[in-house]
Image (cartoon, coloured by chain):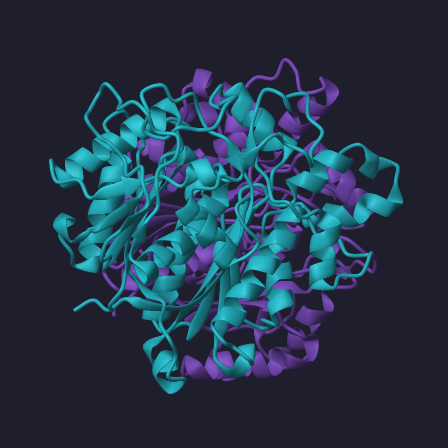
């Protein structure tokens, strides 16, 4: 089986992350219930006329894919695999409201066409002229991990040699409005820097695109080696430790081998308890890192976590702003990511220094 | 030598029947499920025909034994019914005896409830339970729960009209790589105003029964359906001495990279998908005994797919037919129900007629099978082609 490498990264998020020469040097301390992304100059990558037709998610996805390809010095890839929890929610909202408001009359196809979940994957393929394998996974908080796993299986078996993998989600006004009603979004504004200490229900919603070029050949500037990825539709809190220990054991690791654990805490008092189980238990003495106070919550936010892990491994640095505890590590060789959303769709991902 | 992945169970609910047997009987007797729409109030009701499932949500909920507080979309209800049938058909009594996963697919997801309660959500607490059911993964989570799949790999694919074919492909990959011992794969999509109006704006809905590969075809009929297959590893089959219905022998996915919704005129994507599937199956074009075509009866699809047939098979095109005149185009579920039809074709050595065909297309001389035909079938190729240029082929075989 071939090894799988993360050869390039690209992140458009609520932090200034689109420039790969930087690494969270300037922390943006949002103070709201929904964070917006720090936009790159989309015009540098997409002709303005085309950009105007694209909803935010498509724009972020297409540009992130271009950044990732540029960094990997590739013109094309063998496959494009995308993950998105909500899909093209802005165009979906537009089409639903138009059809209700106008009693199914005077509708135009554009928003319907762009509402399809695989629009971003399709648009990237169209732009690149990539006729290869093209999948879109849409399973809530493991959408990105499903894409990652699919790519890994193909690269391990040499069915492809380079694959573009990405997670993308956009936030839509109506979607935000109705998720406030059911308390999935916090009622009160909170500063990003205070989020993880929050004692209230709900998360801070956001959006973003995190793309990677994965390959079974290593380059000089490769970020990391991708290890095992596993996802669970359900995982009871009382089983978490056992399941994690089994996962590590299957990968010939124990808790002591993990240099940094990256966790998806989002400041929701009800569901962060899964993370606390690990941070106060198995990983008490491990350097702990969190990321959702930087990027907010969205179904593919774990893509940002993967970006963070890859950057930490490559730079051998843990930015102050992501540290959850005072534990340190001399080397960052093995990183474990753990993510879940509202107690469902859990994932563990391992990344290694090359 | 590439070994196929065993299919040990299947389940289906569509406009032509609420289980596998009813679907098969309708197929061989030429009985269509396409009719006037009855369960959705739409101003287009007289201008379109659809493949609608007879059962109401309340009846489906009752079959599943759900309590009134449930927040199942119709997509989840249909999916749960079909997936449970598949598991029962595979004679699985304990779903936890092997590492069992679920790969489902949908394009509509919970849109039926979203479009119903879009504004009502803002003022009526009673319907807010459906908000969480909107995203595409929700129906899959519910199907997994219905099947008793816990702490396992459960995911969803959405690649428009090729979705369920892609779920079968990923499922087969998970078995081959040893990640899972057993995986339930397929898809579910219900009818919605969203898709009715969407396809209406694209002007590809027919006001009559759809007529695949006919010169005078006027477009597609939408349909709703769900179908699932149980795929099991060689070890599970051997240990349980299980009956294998057929094998997933080959699969391929490619992108047309031509247009966001339309297929390329020369069928690049479909040609590549079929080529890849043949390669994985280690087969030559002449090994294919029957093609269950995507054949949606849109002007664009049938031309593109037909040209792809000519590119792959030359002048020796196997018997082919589209079953869309029976069920309508069931979007994400299409690759799932047509996988069930492909397996049934192999089991019964029977090819289904392409209903409503009269006049060959002027671009080429391709004539689908128009009568039920009995013939030894060892391999069936099934195509699913969708928006975003997504083209998929799955090859099913009698032997591994």
- Which residue ends up furthest to the bottom in the rendered image? B239
User: Which residue is painted at 55% across and 62% down in the image?
Assistant: B83
Residue A128, percent from left and from top: 31, 33
Q: In the image, is A177 to the left or to the right of A45?
A: right
- Can the viewer see residue A89? yes
Judge by depth and name the residue closer to the eye, A108 or B193. B193
Q: Is residue A214 above or below residue A260?
A: above
Q: Residue at x 50, y 27 (%)?
A: A113
Q: Position of residue B345 (x, y in %)?
A: 33, 55
Residue B299: x %, y % from top left: 36, 22
Expressed as whole percent of the image width and height from the top left, the position of residue B290 reads 25, 48
> Is A346 placed above or below B286 here?
below
Count of all numbered marks drawn on residues in the image: 0
The one nearer the camera, A87 or B188, is B188
Q: Quadrant of the C terminus of chain B?
A: bottom left
Q: Which chain is purple?
A: A
Q: Quadrant of residue A339?
A: bottom right
Compared across the picture, whether B125 is left or right of B345 comes to: right
Q: Is residue B339 above or below residue B305?
A: below
Query: Which chain is cyan in the rendering?
Result: B
Question: Position of B222 compared to A202: left or right?
Answer: left
């Amino acid at each position: 089986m071939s090894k799988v490498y993360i050869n390039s990264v690209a992140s458009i998020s609520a932090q200034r992350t689109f420039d790969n020469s930087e690494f969270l040097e300037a922390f943006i301390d949002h103070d709201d219930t929904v964070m917006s992304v720090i936009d790159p100059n989309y015009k540098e990558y997409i002709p303005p006329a085309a950009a105007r037709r694209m909803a935010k998610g498509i724009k972020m996805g297409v540009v992130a894919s271009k950044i990732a390809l540029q960094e990997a010095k590739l013109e094309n890839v063998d496959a494009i695999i995308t993950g998105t929890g909500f899909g093209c929610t802005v165009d979906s909202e537009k089409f639903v409201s138009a059809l209700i408001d106008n009693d199914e009359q005077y509708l135009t196809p554009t928003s319907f066409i762009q509402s399809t979940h695989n629009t971003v994957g399709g648009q990237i393929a169209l732009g690149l002229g990539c006729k290869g394998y093209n999948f879109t996974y849409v399973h809530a908080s493991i959408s990105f991990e499903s894409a990652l796993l699919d790519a890994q299986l193909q690269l391990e078996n040499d069915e492809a040699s380079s694959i573009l993998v990405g997670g993308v989600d956009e936030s839509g006004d109506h979607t935000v409005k109705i998720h406030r009603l059911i308390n999935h979004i916090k009622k009160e504004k909170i500063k990003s820097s205070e989020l993880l200490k929050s004692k209230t229900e709900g998360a801070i919603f956001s959006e973003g695109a995190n793309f990677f070029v994965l390959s079974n050949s290593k380059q000089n500037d490769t970020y990391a080696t991708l290890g095992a990825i596993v996802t669970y539709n359900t995982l009871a809190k009382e089983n978490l430790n056992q399941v994690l220990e089994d996962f590590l054991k299957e990968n010939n690791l124990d808790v002591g081998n993990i240099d940094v654990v990256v966790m998806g805490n989002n400041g929701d008092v009800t569901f962060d308890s899964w993370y606390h189980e690990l941070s106060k238990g198995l990983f008490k003495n491990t350097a702990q890192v969190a990321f959702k106070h930087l990027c907010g919550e969205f179904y593919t936010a774990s893509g940002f976590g993967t970006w963070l892990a890859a950057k930490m491994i490559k730079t051998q640095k843990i930015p102050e702003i992501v540290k959850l505890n005072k534990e340190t590590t001399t080397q960052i060789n093995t990183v474990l990511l753990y993510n879940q959303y509202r107690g469902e769709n859990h994932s563990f991902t391992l990344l290694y220094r090359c | 030598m590439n070994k196929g992945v065993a299919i040990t169970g299947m389940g289906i609910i569509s406009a032509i029947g609420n289980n596998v047997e009813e679907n098969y009987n309708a197929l061989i007797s030429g009985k269509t499920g396409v009719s006037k729409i009855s369960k959705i109030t739409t101003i287009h009701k007289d201008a379109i025909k659809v493949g609608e499932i007879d059962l109401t949500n309340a009846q489906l909920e009752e079959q599943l034994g759900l309590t009134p507080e449930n927040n199942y979309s119709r997509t989840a209800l249909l999916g749960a019914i079909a997936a449970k049938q598949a598991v029962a058909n595979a004679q699985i009594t304990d779903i936890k005896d092997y590492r069992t996963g679920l790969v489902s697919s949908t394009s509509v997801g919970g849109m039926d409830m979203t479009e119903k309660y879009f504004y009502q959500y803002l003022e009526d607490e009673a319907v807010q339970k459906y908000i969480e059911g909107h995203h595409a993964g929700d129906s899959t989570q519910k199907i997994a729960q219905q099947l008793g799949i816990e702490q396992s790999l459960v995911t969803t694919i959405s690649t428009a009209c090729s979705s369920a074919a892609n779920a079968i492909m990923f499922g087969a990959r998970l078995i081959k790589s040893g990640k899972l011992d057993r995986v339930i794969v397929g898809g579910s999509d219900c009818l919605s105003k969203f898709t009715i109006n969407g396809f209406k704006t694209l002007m590809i809905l027919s006001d009559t029964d759809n007529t695949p590969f006919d010169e005078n075809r006027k477009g597609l009929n939408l349909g709703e359906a769900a179908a699932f297959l149980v795929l099991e590893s060689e070890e599970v089959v051997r240990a349980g001495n299980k009956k294998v219905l057929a094998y997933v022998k080959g699969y391929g996915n490619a992108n047309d990279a031509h247009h966001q919704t339309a297929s390329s005129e020369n069928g690049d994507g479909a040609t590549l998908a079929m080529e890849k599937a043949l390669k994985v199956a280690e087969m030559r074009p002449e090994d294919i005994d029957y093609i269950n075509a995507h054949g949606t009866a849109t002007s664009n699809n049938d031309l593109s797919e037909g040209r792809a047939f000519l590119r792959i098979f030359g002048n020796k095109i196997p018997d082919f037919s589209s079953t869309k005149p029976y069920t309508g185009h069931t979007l994400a579920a299409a690759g799932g129900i047509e996988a069930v039809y492909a397996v049934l074709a192999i089991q019964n050595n029977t090819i289904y007629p392409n209903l409503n065909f009269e006049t060959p297309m002027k671009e080429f001389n391709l004539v689908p099978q128009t009568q039920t035909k009995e013939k030894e079938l060892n391999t069936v190729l099934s195509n699913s082609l969708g928006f975003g240029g997504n083209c998929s082929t799955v090859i099913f075989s009698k032997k591994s």
